[in-house]
Image: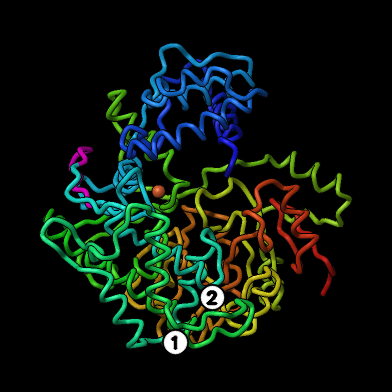
Amino acid sequence: MNEQPFNSLLETLHYLERLGIKPGDIDAFATSWKPSLFRIGTRLGETWSEYLKTRSLFGTLPSETRGFLFHAFDETHVTRLFLEKTYRRIGADIPSHAKIVPVEHHLAHAATAYYFSGFPSAAVLTVDGRGERDCTVVWSVRDGEFEKISSVKIEEGSIGYLYDHVSMRLNFNEYEGPGKVMGLAPYGKKDEGIASRFQELCKLECDDAPYVFADRFRMKSIGRMYDSIADFLTDGLSLDWNPRQKPTTPVANLAWHVQDFTETIMEATARWAKQQTGENRIALAGGVALNAKANMKLHYSRMYEEMFVFPAANDAGGAIGAAAYAYEHTLGGKMRHGALDNVYLGPEYDDEYVKNVVRKGKWNAEFIGRDLNTVAHLISKGQIIVCYQGRAELGPRALGNRSIVADPTRADTWRTMNEIKGREYWRPLAPSVLQEDKEIYFRNPVDHGFMILMFQMTEEGAKRAPAICHVDMTSRPQTVTRESNELWYELISSFKGIKREGIVVNTSFNLAGDPLVETPQDALKSFALGGFDAIYLQGWLIEKKPGY
Ligand SMILES: [Fe+2]
């Protein structure tokens, strides 16, 4: 977090070179923040710290600090320093014609939601911890023109910050916490005492905004404001627990309430947006749009005819939105504007490279190519298998290319998988299902390839695939087609040929505390260290106990 994203830009430049685009050909660099929109105090502080970071990477601390004040008011200055430094690493200069385009943070999120939805017009909600000053924005977007209908400022009520702060009170960190709290919430229930505090906190559906926090909670210092709101919500609750153990009643009930509150706000915001825009389509992005359960509530409300959530809804998608917006609004291009059909956009390694990695490691590997019947058999026997192939997925979900796979018909898979991944035992597992079989397992589902939308499970689905049914009968599936990922589709189909169920457990391939695996070397290292039975590594099958 403390280093600027040099490697990301270097990787991007290398990737573009493979497509025949040279570093000197780039016309614009867009960022998903617009410094001029920050409060002046924040701006000076942030610019100074970024300035120090960038300068110190040159090996010296700034000697020309006199220039700082001047540079603090040039909102492209820090970006330019970063670009110069990165280009120097490849022995080049940044192209003199290239523009630097700072894009407002929520606008960058809105651009991801709109441009990749395939909708010609839509109500767009961007719900986030914070932008420059906004935390929730309602947009009306028509033919690529973004109109900000309403915004809630950070001091007026950030749902993302609230969720983060409550997660921290529940002994989680602010990055992993919200996802875990969403999984914890169904173990709780309504508590009148906590409910009345959440009611006091917020007023819904005002004239000029979808919601605002009550005046008495507002403070100038944002950090203090959300700390004091968390104090208010948790006052008198005994939250001393170890997340590895059984959730206590106050812990589970607080988790239930913060999730319920988030769902209520998201629904109210969507309703307000519909009244204001008259749209029948909604698109969402921003960190809070990762809340697949709140998205489920919107889906079942049938408030909108169509709904799209950008898969990398958090800041991982910010650069894409900024680039799309700058391409159309600064460079005069025209986005192709189709519905996003897959997110296999990350690095990949060719078969020869993978073969060498396998040989070098002296693994006892069998080459099985693209015939995954053997793998499906191992899964059906209760083994926990890694599936690694092709390009890495964009965003937080593994969708068959960096996945751990298991049999969902065995209830004990739930606990085994969590143990292997070093996750808390109560956290749910998600499935990948053949698109044509989705109705067997889920109530009124839609095709959805990105695991960012939950559904209620059918009684039959819960019986047939107990390992992926959470305690509130919900699940967060990826629906899979042959077109979206042929090998992954074949694997699930082969499993169906054996077990009569076109569904598997699919969780991201990483060990506790590690990021998602990316290279074949990472894959084999995590495979060796983790309790997996076998790995399918782009054509190669490696079993820990062959013939088991
Ligand atoms: Fe964001």
Q: Amino acid at mark 2?
A: Pro
For the magenta stretch, what is the residue range? 138-146
Residue 518 vertical position relative to residue 445 in the rendered view, above or below: above
Closer to the camera in the image, 478 or 98: 98
Which residue is found at the position 16% from the left and 61% from the top? Answer: 272
Residue 372 position (above or below residue 124): below
Q: Is residue 327 above or below residue 479?
A: above
SS at mark 2?
loop
Q: Which mark is residue 368?
A: none
Tell me which numbered mark, 2 or 1, is placed earlier along the sequence: 2
492 in the magenta segment? no
- The answer to whether residue 473 is visible is no
Residue sitting at 64 percent across and 84 percent down?
412
According to the image, label 1 marks what residue?
460
Q: Amino acid at mark 1?
A: Glu
The residue at 45%/20% (across/down) is 26
| Circle 1 Cα neighbour tier, 10 Å, few/some/many (<14 / 14–19 / ≥20) | few
Q: Quadrant of the C terminus?
A: bottom right
Q: Which residue lies under the disc numbered 2?
A: 428
